[in-house]
C-alpha cells in the first residue's frame, strides 16, 4: 500500500488542541464584544453560487482569486472569499420579514486561492459585524465602537492602535470636479489603496497621470467623516484620525470607510477594515438598504496579539484527572467521575493501566490542573487526596467537597 | 443589471439568527458533555488532499459522493466528507510528540455531493469524538458514555433511545469459518448494513446467496461486546443491547461498532454511530494506533430534539435595549450603554429616531427581555424606568443597579 502524506492541504491549517484553544479564546472575545453591542449571530454555508461574486466584486476576484468549480449539476460554485455578499443575500431574501435595523455578526471561514504568505492563508476565519437599516452616522460609529472595544478587550492599549477614517463620498466629489469617468475614478481609488506599498515619487507620478497636476489628497476631515470622529471622541474613543488614503479595495463601498492600524511601524498592513455599502442589496433587485460593517481576520488577530504578548497560555478544558490504582478500582472511579461531572467538573479517567506516577506526569503534560488516585484506601475511607499539579500541594477531601474546591481554584 | 437570486446554493442552509441560536445551543451541549469527559477540541480545514479518502473509504465515495476538484496547481482537493481521515492524519503527523491516550473532539462541517433529502444535506455539521491509544474496552465504553450523556443532556429519557452494539470481530470470525474471501466478506457486511432498509425475504435470499444456507445472524452477545455492555450497565447505562445487524458502512472499523436509535418507530435511521478503527493510522506508514470514536450530525440532532419538543425557545443574546428620547439624548445614552456593557450586559442602542413606542415594539419582536428610555427627565434624575417586555412591568433603578437587576432576572 502506498504511504499517504500526513501534511494538510497547501495553505490551510490544522488546529491541534493548543492551537484550537487560542482560536476558541479569540472567537470568545469576538462574540462577547459583538453581543455586548446587541449584535446577534448568523451563519451560512461556505458554498455560494459563483454569480454572487461576479456582480459587485468585478470578475477578477472570481476568476483568479477564488476557488470556483462546476458541480455535476452544471452549477458554478464558489467557496466564499468574503462574507458581505452572503449576508447581503440573506438580508435581501427576507427583507419583508426582518425587523430593521439589524445588527448581525458571524465568524465565517473564507477562502482565497492565492500564494500562501505571512498573514494571507488560503483559508482563514473572519469576524463580520454588520448593521443594516440605519442611514445616520450613528451606525458607522456603532460598528467602529465594536471594533475598538474588541481590540481593547484583547488587551491592546489605546496607543497601540489607530483608527483611520475616510469617506468614498469625498473621493466621488473630487472625481466629479476633475471630470473623471467611472473607470478613471476606479483607477484613482485602486492607486490610492496601494499608496503605502509604493515609493512616494512613484505614487505622485501615477497620481498625476490619472487625476491631473492639480489633484492632491486631502489633509483635513470634513462632513460625515468629521461627524463620526466627533461622535467617537465623545464616547471616549480618541485614537481616531482622518486619512484620505483609506479607500478600501472592494467596489461596493459608498460612504464612510475605515481601517485600523497597529501603531508599531513593523506591522504596516491594516489590522481590520470596513465601511458603508448602501447600494449592495440592489444587486438582488428591490430597494437600497443602508448598511455598514467591518471584517477582522483571525490570522491578523493572532499576529497582533502575539507581537504584544497578549495570547493566553494554554490550560486544558479538563479540570481533573482520576487515576484508578488498578483494574479493581475502575468501577468506583467511573462512578466518582460521573458524580463530579454532574457537579460541573470536566473529569478524565486514566484507564491506561500505567503506574500512578505516570498518570500524574501525563495529566501535568496535558495541562490539567488537578489529579487524584482512587485505591482501596480511598474507596473504604471515602476521602481523596487531590493534588494540584503545578504546586504538587495535596488536599484531603470528601467526594462532595471536590467540585467546589476545584472550581474555586480554577476560576 | 441582471437581478441576482437570493437563494442559497442547493442543499445547504442559511442560518438566520433564530436558526443560529439553535445551532449554538446544540454545539454548546456537545462541547460541554465532551469536555466533561476530558475530551479537548481540535480543528482542521475543510480542504483535504483527495488521496486521503481514496485510501480507506474505497474509490466510490471520492468519485461519486464528494466534492472533489483539481486546483490550479494540479492538486486534487476534496471538501471533507467525514472527519475520521483528517483526525487520523493529524494524529499520525505528530505521533511522537503527542502524549497518548488522546481524547479529542471537534464539530466540523462536512460535505456530501448527493441529492438533498430529509436529514441528508450537502453540508452538515457533525460532532466527532475520538479516543486514541487505548486498546481495552474501557475506551469503547468511554466514548459510548459520551454519546449517552449528550442525549441525556439534551433532555432525552433513557427509554427514548437505544444503544445497539456489535463487533466487526464476530463477523470476521464467521466469515473465516465460512471460508469467505475479503470481497465476499465486504459484500456480506454491506448487505447486513442495509438490512433495515430491505424486505425480510429479500434480505434472507441475498444472505444465502453470499454466505450459504447455514449462515444466520447471531442473537447472543459474546466476548468484547458482552464486556462493553456489562461495563456500561455498571456505570448506570442500561439502554444498551447487542445487535448483530449493526456493522457500519466504512471499511476502516476493526472491532466494536455501535449505533444509537430513537425508540420512536417513526424514526428508523440511526441517530449516531461509531466504532473502533485500530488500523486506520497505518495508511500513513508507521505502526497501528488503537482508536475508537463516533460521529453525531446536527441535522439528525435537530430532528430528534424537534420530535420530542426539546428545542429551546429563542431569546436574544441582547439583554437590554436603550431608546434615546431624541437626538439630544444620544450622548448620555451611549455613555450609559458603555457603563452597562462594562458591568457585563449586552446592550443595544436604538438610534432609529422612531417613536419610543416603536422602539419597545421592535425590542420585543427581537426577543430582547428589557428596554428603557433615556429622556431629559432620566438624564437629570439619574433614574431609569426599566421595562420587562414580556410582562410590561416597570422598575425604577439607578444606573449602577441595572446590571445586577437584569442579570438576576435573565439567568
Image (tube, coloured by chain):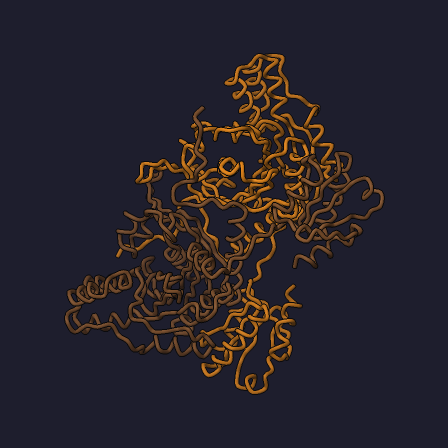
Chain colours: A brown, B orange
Rendered location of residue B353, percent (x, y): 45, 77
At 45% from the left edge and 44% from the top edge, which residue is drawn? B45
Q: Is residue B118 above or below residue A211?
A: above
At 40% from the left edge and 63% from the top edge, which residue is drawn? A294
Q: Which of the 4 image quadrants contains residue B66?
A: top left
A78 on left or right of B98? left
Q: Nearer the viewer, residue B51 or A173?
A: B51
Rendered location of residue B403, percent (x, y): 62, 72
Q: Nearer the viewer, residue A125 or A282?
A: A125
Q: Is residue A310 above or below residue B56?
A: below
Rendered location of residue B330, percent (x, y): 47, 79
Image quarter (top left, top right, bottom left or bottom right) of the C terminus of chain A = bottom right
Q: Which of the 4 image quadrants contains residue B218?
A: top right
At 68% from the left edge and 37% from the top edge, which residue is drawn? A351
B213 on left or right of A307? right
On the question of residue B267 being in view, the answer is no
On the question of residue A50 being in view, the answer is yes
Amino acid at each position: 500500500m502506498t504511504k499517504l502524506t500526513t501534511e494538510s492541504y497547501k495553505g490551510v491549517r490544522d488546529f491541534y488542541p493548543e492551537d484550537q484553544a487560542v482560536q476558541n479564546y479569540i472567537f470568545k472575545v469576538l462574540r462577547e464584544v459583538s453581543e455586548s453591542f446587541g449584535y446577534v449571530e448568523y451563519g451560512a454555508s461556505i458554498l455560494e453560487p459563483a454569480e454572487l461574486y461576479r456582480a459587485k466584486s468585478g470578475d477578477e476576484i472570481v476568476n483568479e482569486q477564488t476557488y470556483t468549480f462546476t458541480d455535476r449539476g452544471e452549477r458554478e460554485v464558489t467557496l466564499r472569499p468574503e462574507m458581505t455578499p452572503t449576508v447581503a443575500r440573506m438580508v435581501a431574501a427576507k427583507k419583508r420579514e426582518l425587523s430593521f435595523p439589524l445588527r448581525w455578526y458571524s465568524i465565517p471561514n473564507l477562502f482565497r486561492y492565492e500564494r500562501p504568505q505571512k498573514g494571507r492563508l488560503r483559508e482563514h476565519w473572519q469576524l463580520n459585524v454588520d448593521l443594516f437599516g440605519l442611514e445616520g452616522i450613528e451606525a458607522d460609529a456603532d460598528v467602529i465602537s465594536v471594533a475598538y472595544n474588541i481590540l481593547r478587550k484583547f488587551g491592546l492599549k489605546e496607543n497601540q492602535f489607530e483608527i483611520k477614517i475616510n469617506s468614498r463620498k469625498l473621493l466621488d466629489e473630487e472625481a466629479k470636479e476633475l471630470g473623471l469617468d467611472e473607470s478613471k475614478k476606479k483607477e484613482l481609488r485602486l492607486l490610492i489603496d496601494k499608496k503605502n506599498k509604493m515609493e512616494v515619487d512613484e505614487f505622485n507620478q501615477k497620481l498625476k497621470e490619472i487625476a491631473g497636476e492639480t489633484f492632491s489628497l486631502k489633509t483635513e476631515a470634513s462632513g460625515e467623516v468629521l461627524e463620526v470622529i466627533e461622535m467617537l471622541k465623545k464616547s471616549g474613543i480618541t485614537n481616531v484620525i482622518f486619512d484620505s488614503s483609506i479607500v478600501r479595495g472592494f467596489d461596493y463601498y459608498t460612504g464612510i470607510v475605515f481601517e485600523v492600524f497597529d501603531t508599531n511601524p513593523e506591522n504596516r498592513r491594516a489590522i481590520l477594515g470596513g465601511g458603508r455599502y448602501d447600494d449592495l442589496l440592489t444587486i438582488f433587485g428591490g430597494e437600497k438598504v443602508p448598511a455598514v460593517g467591518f471584517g477582522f481576520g483571525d490570522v491578523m488577530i493572532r499576529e497582533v496579539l502575539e507581537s504584544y504578548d497578549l495570547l493566553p497560555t494554554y490550560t486544558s478544558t479538563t479540570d481533573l484527572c482520576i487515576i484508578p490504582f488498578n483494574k479493581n478500582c475502575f468501577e468506583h472511579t467511573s462512578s466518582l467521575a460521573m458524580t463530579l461531572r454532574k457537579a460541573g467538573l470536566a473529569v478524565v479517567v486514566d484507564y491506561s493501566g500505567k503506574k500512578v506516577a505516570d498518570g500524574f506526569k501525563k495529566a501535568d503534560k496535558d495541562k490539567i490542573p488537578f489529579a487524584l488516585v482512587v485505591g482501596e484506601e480511598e474507596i473504604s475511607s471515602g476521602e481523596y487526596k487531590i493534588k494540584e499539579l503545578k504546586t504538587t500541594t495535596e488536599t484531603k477531601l470528601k467526594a462532595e467537597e471536590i467540585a467546589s474546591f476545584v472550581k474555586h481554584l480554577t476560576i
